[in-house]
Amino acid sequence: QVQLVESGGGLVQPGGSLRLSCAASGIDFSRKTMGWYRQAPGKERELVARISSVFETKYGDSVKGRFTISRDNAKDTVFLQMNSLKPEDTAVYYCCYTNDLYVPSHWGKGTLVTVSS
């Protein structure tokens, strides 16, 4: 059974940092491209970042230079380090893995990030 379990969300002030984690099970993790997407109220889900099995990364334009995606294949876990957070980063953040065309194949349940003073 495939499971992706996100953690690390919460309330943070503008300019602050958070680190999200996504623990995977039931998949051959090291061979998967893993991704983080987010969905704000009233908006479509959008790519935040993804990391391939060979550690190639891609970021959404709005988070470049502020967010960093990484993975630990020994722990079947992908991380999202979020720095210099802005109110517009407020969203539910979802972990996923993708197919070979980078289309998400399976989603976690999400973790809420709220950036507010």
Image (spheres, rainbow, N blue to C red):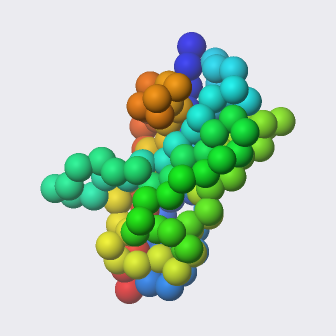
Percent x, y for residue 26? 64, 18
Q: Residue at x 56, y 19 (%)?
A: 2
Q: Residue at x 54, y 47 (%)?
A: 50
Most distant residue in the right direction? 74
Number of disc labels: 0
**Against 53, is 62 above or below?**
below
Left/right of residue 45 with respect to residue 81 in the rendered view:
left
Most distant residue in the left direction? 42
Quadrant for the C terminus, please: bottom left
**Against 17, is 50 above or below?**
above
**Front-lying residue, 44 or 54:** 54
Percent x, y for residue 116? 37, 79
Is residue 111 visible in the rendered image? The answer is no
Is residue 94 visible in the rendered image? The answer is yes
Quadrant for the N terminus, please: top right
Q: Residue at x 72, y 39 (%)?
A: 54
Q: Residue at x 66, y 47 (%)?
A: 56
Left/right of residue 46 with respect to residue 3 in the rendered view:
left
Most distant residue in the top direction? 1
Percent x, y for residue 46? 34, 51
In which quarter of the view is residue 40 placed?
Answer: bottom left
Percent x, y for residue 100? 52, 26
**Front-lying residue, 97 or 76:** 97
**Front-lying residue, 117 or 101:** 101
In which quarter of the view is residue 29 placed?
Answer: top right
